Amino acid sequence: MRDPSAGPRVMLKRLRELMAEPLEPQDRLDRIVRQIAQNMVAEVCSFYVLRADGVLELYATEGLNPGAVHLAQLKMGQGLVGTIAAGARPLNLSDAQSHPAFTYLPETGEEIYHSFLGAPILRAGRTLGVLVIQNKAMRNYSEDELEALETTAMVLAEMIATGDLKKVTRPGLELDLSRPVTIDGDAYSDGIGLGHAVLHEPRIVVTELLNEDIDSELSRLEEALGSLRISIDDMLSRRDVSMEGEHRAVLEAYRMFAHDRGWVRKLEEAIRNGLTAEAAVEKVQSDMRARMIHMTDPYLRERLHDFDDLANRLLRQLTGFNVKAHQAEFPDSAIIVARAMGAAELLDYTQSKVRGLVLEEGSVTSHVVIVAKAMGIPVVGQASGIVSMTENGDPIIIDGDDGNVHLRPVTDLESAYAEKVRFSARRQEQFRALRAVEPVTSDGTAVTLQMNAGLLVDLPQLEESGASGVGLFRTELQFMIASTMPRVDEQEQFYRNALKQAEGRPITFRALDIGGDKVIPYFRAAPEENPALGWRAMRLALDRPGILRTQLRALLRATGGRELKLMFPMVTEIAEFRAARELVNKEVGHLSRFGYDLPRKVELGAMLEVPSLMWQLDELMREADFVSVGSNDLFQFTMASDRGNGRVSNRFDPLGRTFLRMLRQIVIAADARGTPLTLCGEMAGRTLPAMALIGLGFRSISMAPAAIGPVKSMLLPLDVGKLEQVLLPALDEVDPKYTVRELLSDFADANGVPL
Ligand code: PEP
Ligand code: MG
């Protein structure tokens, strides 16, 4: 019996030879289509390539009028070829002309051909062109023939992607692969970065496409699948604390997919048709992505991501991909492109080379963004489709001011941005010149500007930014990037280092705030349906006092002889704050019994980030040594709007009257008791909201270090008395004509306040 895959294999072998021969590109293309036609017993074989302007151009043909090459063109969605490209799906027709999409192109002379088989040329789920065969007779092409054509299309995809066709591309008509793309995402961290793309999960480029020997490729695949399954089983069977909840669910899905017969069968089929095992993985994945890419169902999209990740793992097994070598090729100006990312992963990169971060998902208050901000790296999130459109090394510009990402930008745009970067460097110079200037408004109101930190890498920014201290030190970041729970002496050393680097400027430490969006991978916690409202922060700390006591011990020891400023997160009832104070007292007693050098003074504060405290303001202001408003959480809980969910996080405005009235009440309560008050959420670092806060009566705010300069330059010319007259009455308006944001922005314009 004839082996059905013998045909494609012979063809692929011939194609490989053709690719290796020293031929002129057009000549090579012509021979390739002739070869395909011959092998597939077709009278016509045509190769269309998608251009940057969305037109599919005939690049080579066997059988159609040769004069039509580079002249015959179809738009995306136009004709049969355009339909295949637009839908990224093949078409198999015994009578092409009766298909409703059929468009007659007189220059090709194709009217005499009836049957038609066309396959999209795909790479990473993107359509790069279309490959077609045609016959005069009304022929029904078999599944095997379609499979063979799709496999061949893959070889052509590689040819397009490696830039082989550049020499036959007419000037001004670039190919789609090099098309400039602008993606409108969300601005998460200010600044502009120019550089080259680095895919966080590197796409493995398969270079060996065609196999020499089917059996050995099948056994390579089997072996790789075997190790993949074992590694997943291993991860699942580890009694590891990180194996709870979400992570486990993902791995279980992986295990299911790794055993999926349909998937394995498709892989084997592609190998039988002549591909290497890795090329088979790439092909099957590309087909799947192309079919699933338009789906909007979030569950199915997530499954597609799972399959992608799995295919990537398999590719790594097969190609022996070396992550270290990949990092060695790291460009000097790198813009990291990722679907999503953990804070720790960002820190793994060489910081001095990272110029920006683009996330396909993410949200402004997720920790990777907070860390990036602390490091002064521009971030754009919700950049939809960026990962599949980017090739490693593509030129890319990230605009963290307006949320745009420009992939493969045209020269004019690139020079405009380069100019913008020079301009902003000059502005940074001006901000730097303000470092030593006291933050006092034009009518004599002093405002304390502190910075937020959480890692030692942040602390040099104290000097750089001119912040007077650290208003929020997120101690959980150290825990989040560690692989095991830091021991008491490690914690002590860390806090000691932080204080040393602060060179006498005060640091307000925040006790561990874990749970919710702050995930510590090694910390065992049962999965929760609603983690933001779950067992977290103070709740967890008071139920399991061992963790908090260890931290208190480390902090007290590290601040021996100095002042300790410490605040507690997510206080919901005043009783929790009292309980925390008790724990501090116990630790102080313990340490003094053992003869430790104790802090000179201990100031204990509460974070106001749960709305319930609004009805305990009096007790709070009386009992806490200071209060710090965590506006990120206070806003999310007040508006019932998840800070980590891009869909709702921007739905309501923190400068809306609702939230501002709340903040004003807090200021009044603090003033009444003389309790020091500060605010350390993200709004403090944006000039307009920061101006609003000063107008509401805040005299201390804490923000990302990069925001200190702009906020200081905003407040120097500010007349607070005048601002209060505009802002405070506006808060009480019942039927307002203007939003507070509009009023404030007009005020700034009219009074020369730079925003
Ligand atoms: C806040 O909630 O506003 C805050 C400062 O804390 P975090 O962002 O770490 O939750
Ligand atoms: Mg918070």
Image (cartoon, rainbow, N blue to C red):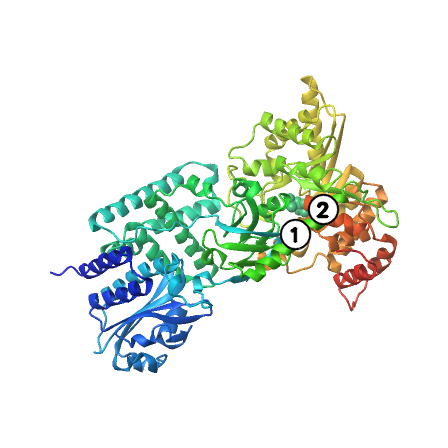
Number of marks in the rendered image: 2
Inter-mark Cα distance, 1 to 2? 11 Å
| Residue in the picture at 29% in, 60% down | 23
Residue 28 vertical position relative to residue 675 in the rendered view, above or below: below
Residue 574 visible somewhere in the drawing? no
Q: Which of 728 and 349 is in front in this view?
A: 349
Q: Mark 2 points at which residue?
A: 429
- Measured as percent of width and height from the top left, residue 358 is found at 54, 53
Q: In this view, does 212 lie above or below 578?
A: below
- Secondary structure category for the residue under label 1: helix
Q: Mark 1 points at which residue?
A: 422
Name the foreground residue: 707 vs 179. 179
Q: What residue type is labelled 2?
A: Glu
Q: Is mark 2 on a helix, strand or loop?
A: helix
| Front-lying residue, 447 or 160 | 160
Q: Which comes sooner in the sequence, label 1 or label 2? A: 1
Q: From the viewer's perspective, tell me whether residue 301 is left or right of residue 40.
A: right
Image quadrant where residue 420 sits? bottom right
